[in-house]
Image: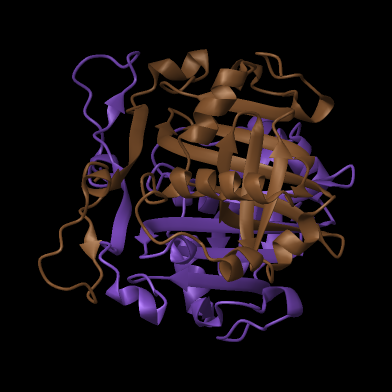
Chain colours: A purple, B brown
Amino acid sequence: MSATLSPTPRTTLNRAKERARTEREDLYGVLDAGLVCHLGVLVDGAPMVVPTGYGRLGDTLYLHGSTGARSLRSAHGTQVCVTVTHLDGIVLARSIFHHSVNYRSAVVYGTAAVVEDPDERLTALRALSEQLAPGQWDTVRQPTAKELAATVVLSLPLSEASVKIRQGPPKDDEADYALPHWAGVLPLTTVWGPPQPDPALPPGRPAPAHITDRA
Amino acid sequence: MSATLSPTPRTTLNRAKERARTEREDLYGVLDAGLVCHLGVLVDGAPMVVPTGYGRLGDTLYLHGSTGARSLRSAHGTQVCVTVTHLDGIVLARSIFHHSVNYRSAVVYGTAAVVEDPDERLTALRALSEQLAPGQWDTVRQPTAKELAATVVLSLPLSEASVKIRQGPPKDDEADYALPHWAGVLPLTTVWGPPQPDPALPPGRPAPAHITDRA
């Protein structure tokens, strides 16, 4: 696909156009930095939004879930929307109206398809696993045939997407800069805590480096 | 409304039923701890999922945005879905299949309505402001008539919702507990950084206590 995102009416910002990013690399950046997405599907004519894991391989986004999941059953062959959001801070302005948030978000639209090919299913599941828990796929017990049969894998092409990024201080009305209020950003970060061992582990079994290095 | 959430087919879990919470207090807890939600609306027959602020007053959820926002224009009088998710950790199991996440999520379904009453609009906007930036409403410049006219406020009753919470260590297959792999939880926390003053502030203006106390 091209290095820039192809704009469609629904991926073109009407407002705050300076927040739009049109480079495909920006889309990858927002997606690759995330852990869960919010998947929007239609169920009985109404939108349903569920948090779920995802993985990216090139220009394909993969989702997965139980064969019993309502949201996934509804998604095959239908239009879905996948949104990944990073909240980076609260923007405190001199007026209520100009309060905002600093964030990075990607919204992907497309038609989801169930992946049937066994090799692609495994590659996709590995990508999903690596997104959430890098290093685990090559370490722990692999999926059995029964587990694989209980898992639906969906693919979504990264062909229609919008990326929005807001960073930096508030933008106040010119006259408001004379007001006596403090203004700025209260930054937010997501941090890893120390690994919490499963109480069922035998004593003295250390967490491997690919886990401790992350924390 | 009653102290328990009234189950409907779409708010009743088919799987992992032990994660379901049916107390209204649990819904309040998940919503009140959040900063942004993901709003799902139908636009031209397809789902659109956008991150946005929200506020809660009793059993009403409020959303707001510019009169020019596509997602809000589409929402009035239609069924929407609002999801709030807290990701609390990555659950590292002894098999890929049992990897999971610890999280708290609330999914609210309902018909959104534009709030027209001026008093309710102001009360709602205050709730939205307090959710994201507590203490600011009573401090900085209030909205002008022109700013209010440019703002749409939507209400959504908290009458149909599901709450899911997963906490604790992995649940592995019985036979897998004998495997040599480390297992446990890698916890995630969202933390505030120190306030970053707007470069346009005159030197020596300290952030007020309601901001520094949060950070």
* Residue at 56% across, 34% down: B105
x, y percent for residue A4: 57, 85
* Residue at 34% across, 20% down: A198
Which residue ends up furthest to the left in the rendered image? B204
In the image, is residue B208 above or below residue A201?
Answer: below
In the image, is residue B193 above or below residue A193?
Answer: below
In the image, is residue A45 above or below residue A66?
Answer: below
Examine the rendering and report whether any part of residue A78 can be seen: yes
* Residue at 64% across, 39% down: B61
x, y percent for residue B120: 65, 44
In the image, is residue B199 above or below residue A202?
Answer: below
- Assign the C terminus of chain A to one quadrant of the image: top left
x, y percent for residue B71: 71, 62
- Assign the N terminus of chain A to one quadrant of the image: bottom right
Examine the rendering and report whether any part of residue A159 can be seen: no
x, y percent for residue A109: 71, 65
The residue nearer to you, when weighing B191 against A128, is: B191
Query: Is B157 on the left or on the right of B121, as rendered?
Result: right
The quadrant where residue A56 appears: bottom right
- Numbered disc total: 0
Query: Is B92 on the left or on the right of B77, as rendered?
Result: left
Query: Is B112 on the left or on the right of A5, as rendered?
Result: right
The residue nearer to you, when weighing A210 against A46, is: A46
Query: Is A51 on the left or on the right of B186, as rendered?
Result: right
